[in-house]
Image (spheres, rainbow, N blue to C red):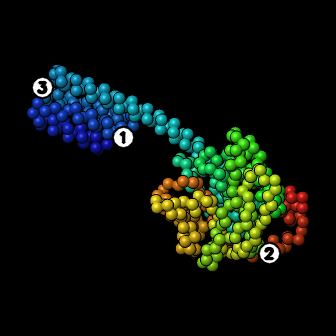
Amino acid sequence: MLLPIGLIIAIAVVDIQTPESVHLGPLLVVAPAITVAFGGAWLTGLIGVLAVAAQVVIAVFHGGLTTTNHISQIVGLAVLSILAVIVCWVRGRREAELAHVRSVSEAAQRALLRPLPRRLGSLHLSCTYLAAAKEAHIGGDLYAVARIGDRTRVLIGDVRGKGLAAVGEAAGLMGAFQEAAHQHVTLPALASALDRSACRYLTQYPGTDDDVQEHFITALLLEIPDHDSSAQLTYCGHPPPLLISRGQVNSIPSSPAAPLGMCELEQDIRTSHTFSFEAGDTLLLHTDGLVEARDSSGAFYPLEERLARWTKCSPEELIERIRRDLLVHTGGALDDDAAIVAVRRTAIPHAERLDSELGAGHGGDRRRKGWPTRSGNAA
């Protein structure tokens, strides 16, 4: 507020001190014009009134209020001040509408892609999502977790395309995963169920047949038992995760497999891959928007090189460092959505391990803990 008020005082004092042939009063319109940039309608109106009052004072000292020149200046300044107030009022209404729409949009997006729990069984998780579309929190990338007894299943995927247009497909797959994860014993069976679900969704896509064939979802399924030092992966055309173990960063080997939703394939045989995942190890799952992000020179983001520097970070710290470094690398603008999930296995408490061993041989305990039965349905 000091800037427009200071301008009004300065212009009025200088105009009064100058000869009557010099007219600086019209410059007073600058004060309400500047106020529009940062103030509301009431503040702009107040500055306009002060500017008009200053013009009246100038007129009193320079020939009187009855001169044609001064009357025209006062009227012109008043009209321009009123227009500035109207502009502020219209802008304020639009900003309020935009804020309301944005809050609804944020709530809807967060409901579709909820943050992962920080602790789940013997796992410590952290995640982040960087959307390519402006004013968006999610897009075509997705992640989800499901707790099945004393095991945790994780899904990360990437819908072909980017931005809000792919949100529907991502939401459909996450919903299918939450249901199917409790109904299928093995990851390949779960992947096949998700593939069928994706095909059903894509056949209803409101485009041509060619459009449907070009829509697919790359995905990766992960299963981590609480009381075993191994984990399983099933690939569906998705980039392999990176394992941080004993200060080393290694990529988990992947086997070729078609993405989900490739409906023209009559049969797709998927397998699971078992790897060592011990206490203290961290697994980084990501979508291709991370490794394919480019800087101004066109160089890809060096993920493995960066991870080699941060092998001792906690999942939260690791995710935050990657997020900041990625934004610096790309100059703050992403060409594709990027989802990142860090999973660390923590030490298993002795009491929890003993309880699992005592209950492992009892069918009733298996049902109580949520293990799938032989028919594939969750108890």
Instruction: Please tell me whether residue 377 is drawn above or below residue 242 in the rendered image.
Output: above
Which image quarter holds the C terminus? Answer: bottom right
The residue that mark 1 highlights is 37
Q: Nearer the viewer, residue 301 or 280?
A: 301
The residue that mark 3 highlights is 63
The residue that mark 2 highlights is 354
Q: Element at badge 1? A: loop
Q: Which residue type carries mark 1? A: Ala
Q: Which residue does the image show at 63% across and 79% down from the upper left?
A: 246
Instruction: Please tell me whether residue 116 is drawn above or below residue 106 in the rendered image.
Output: below
Q: Element at badge 2? A: helix
The answer to which quarter of the image holds residue 165 is top right
Whichever of callouts 2 and 3 sits on the residue coming sooner in the sequence is: 3
Q: Which residue type carries mark 3? A: Gly
Q: Which residue type carries mark 2? A: Leu
Q: CA distance from mark 1 to mark 2?
A: 67 Å
Label 1 packing within 10 angstroms: few (<14), some (14-19), many (20+) = few
Q: CA distance from mark 2 to mark 3?
A: 99 Å
Whether residue 347 is visible here, answered yes or no, is no
Q: Residue 286 location in percent, x, y? A: 63, 62
Q: Residue 119 location in percent, x, y? A: 67, 64
Q: Pick out the residue farthest to the bottom.
A: 246
